[in-house]
Amino acid sequence: MTSRIEAALTAATRSAQDGAPPKFASALHYAVFPGGARVRPRLCLAVAGACGDDAPELSDAMCASIELLHCASLVHDDLPCFDDAPLRRGKPTVHRVFGEPLAVLVGDALIVLAFESLARASASVPSRMAPLIALLGRAAGAPHGLCAGQAWESETGAPLQEYHQAKTGSLFAAATMGGALAAGADPGPWSVVGDRLGEAYQVADDLLDALSEPHEVGKPTLRDAALARINAVTLLGVDGAVARLRQRVAEAVESIPACPGAGPLRALVMQTADRLVPKGLKQSAA
Amino acid sequence: MTSRIEAALTAATRSAQDGAPPKFASALHYAVFPGGARVRPRLCLAVAGACGDDAPELSDAMCASIELLHCASLVHDDLPCFDDAPLRRGKPTVHRVFGEPLAVLVGDALIVLAFESLARASASVPSRMAPLIALLGRAAGAPHGLCAGQAWESETGAPLQEYHQAKTGSLFAAATMGGALAAGADPGPWSVVGDRLGEAYQVADDLLDALSEPHEVGKPTLRDAALARINAVTLLGVDGAVARLRQRVAEAVESIPACPGAGPLRALVMQTADRLVPKGLKQSAA
């Protein structure tokens, strides 16, 4: 699975690099490689596999596009006007290495590339193109996608559920629904699976931010407290947050619809989810 | 034509606003309305009309998507890390009114919206969706689109032709080719028309920057000199730049391929082009 994801990301990124201004081309590559856990594309391919994966070039493109959008959001979220983060994935952030102008442009270009490369791959199964692009758009933009989620941070009293759903849940839902769609299955029943996993992941991220050291996670921590952002740990406490995380994963697993590969997918989700609980808490809140 | 363009832009923008964080929704609207001359969507609809415009909902969507990408690029280009512009279209820039974080997010969301709303409209003529989205992607991203064009400003010794082609020509070519494609015509022959008009427009913009007062153009002037950017006026002189502008418009008009409405389109292009030459120069360099 790893090699499929990296190959799809490499092909997409290269198509934007060849002939581009040299520094910009380097910054594009730097923003995508090496990756983090590639959680969203893994989930997308796992669902596609569970649904039969009858058009692997399409599921490859969809999982890559989801990861490209995720990378774009990281590059922009790290900018000085947002988190002003010095580190991401254990190395200096894009704007620290290449400057703010190229960081803005790299994020923009990755968003474009996500749609462009998906449309290119869909040529082989044109009937699936419109719903896949609509799904990607809903997850990335407004009113309920990534951009809207980040924009909730500019509002006072933003609703936690809506904020998390847009900022994190939307791309997870696109991963599960997109995996199903790319394999020709009905995406509807996969929405809840993605939503719940997204929520679990966001709670895990809040726990990491509150409880980890920067060297453990490869990025700054205690950012939510510093920026007075809403966070599951401040709202629910550590034990409450861990309980919610486990509850959401259980709901996700229960929501997996009947499909040829439901059993292995359930096992994979539980295994992935187990890695989400920060190490020191596994005993205390199990 | 104006009412079709504004209606298409309104429909697209509203679809992203309803349910979005309130300040962000306001900023989205502010970035798109009121518009400038809407040169690109006009050109797109004019070409669609010349080719028969048999799917007006599709040409509406394409012209709106091109303008949304243009608006996104203006919002990001005006950011402090680029031009740090206080004014755009005669009013304070998005980041001056809504802050930098929302300005970054509005640009991102407009890019997403361009693809999302085009895919939505293409449902009625699915066979035209893939080439339209590919066209939009090529014009917006890298290696030869808007993002790459802007990124050339981070390189020393960038080639003027390549830089202008990517920064301005690409979206003009998407406008002419997209108008043809949306109407079911072969887009190939329309590429040169867009390229030449884009180049003419970029030279006109360089002339305005060098020769106008801010109140005349609704944005700061003398920016290229201040930022030591490559510019047709510094390279060719004023008379040389005006001559090149006229030459490019003539080439564009000559390149208009045979089509049902070629005559009226030629007249429209010449009329539009005539408005590009700054007022004080029309006599001296005619």
Image (cartoon, coloured by chain):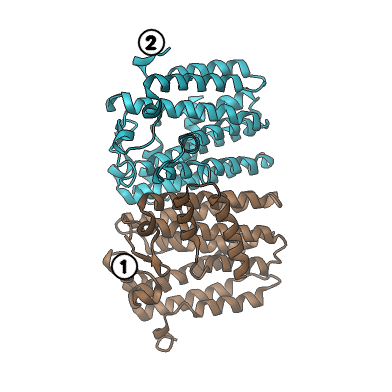
Chain colours: A cyan, B brown
Residue for badge 1: B223
Could you tell me which chain the residue with mark 2 belongs to?
A
Which tag is nearer the camera, tag 1 or tag 2?
A: 2
Q: Label 2 amino acid? A: Gln
What residue is at 38 percent from the left and 39 percent from the top?
Answer: A31
Residue for badge 2: A283
**Number of marks in picture:** 2
Residue B24 image offset from top left, x and y in percent: 45, 51
Please, is residue B284 above or below residue B68 in the view?
A: below
In this view, the residue in front, A96 or A207, is: A207
Q: Label 1 amino acid? A: Arg
Q: Quadrant of residue B202?
A: bottom left
Residue A256 image offset from top left, x and y in percent: 61, 22
A196 to the left or right of B235: right
Mark 1 secondary-structure assignment: helix
In this view, the residue in front, B164 or A104, is: A104
What residue is at 70 percent from the left and 64 percent from the top?
Answer: B53
- Marks 1 and 2 on same chain: no
10 Å crowding of disc 1: few (<14), some (14-19), many (20+):
some
Please, is residue A256 above or below residue B171 in the view?
A: above
What residue is at 43 percent from the left and 45 percent from the top?
Answer: A151
B134 to the left or right of B152: right
Could you tell me which chain the residue with mark 1 belongs to?
B
**C-alpha separation, residue under disc 1 versus residue under disc 2:** 61 Å
Residue B76 image offset from top left, x and y in percent: 40, 55
Most distant residue in the top direction: A283
A203 to the left or right of B154: right
Q: Quadrant of the C terminus of chain A?
A: top left
Please, is residue A143 above or below residue A177 in the view?
A: below
10 Å crowding of disc 2: few (<14), some (14-19), many (20+):
few
Mark 2 secondary-structure assignment: loop
Q: Quadrant of residue B54?
A: bottom right
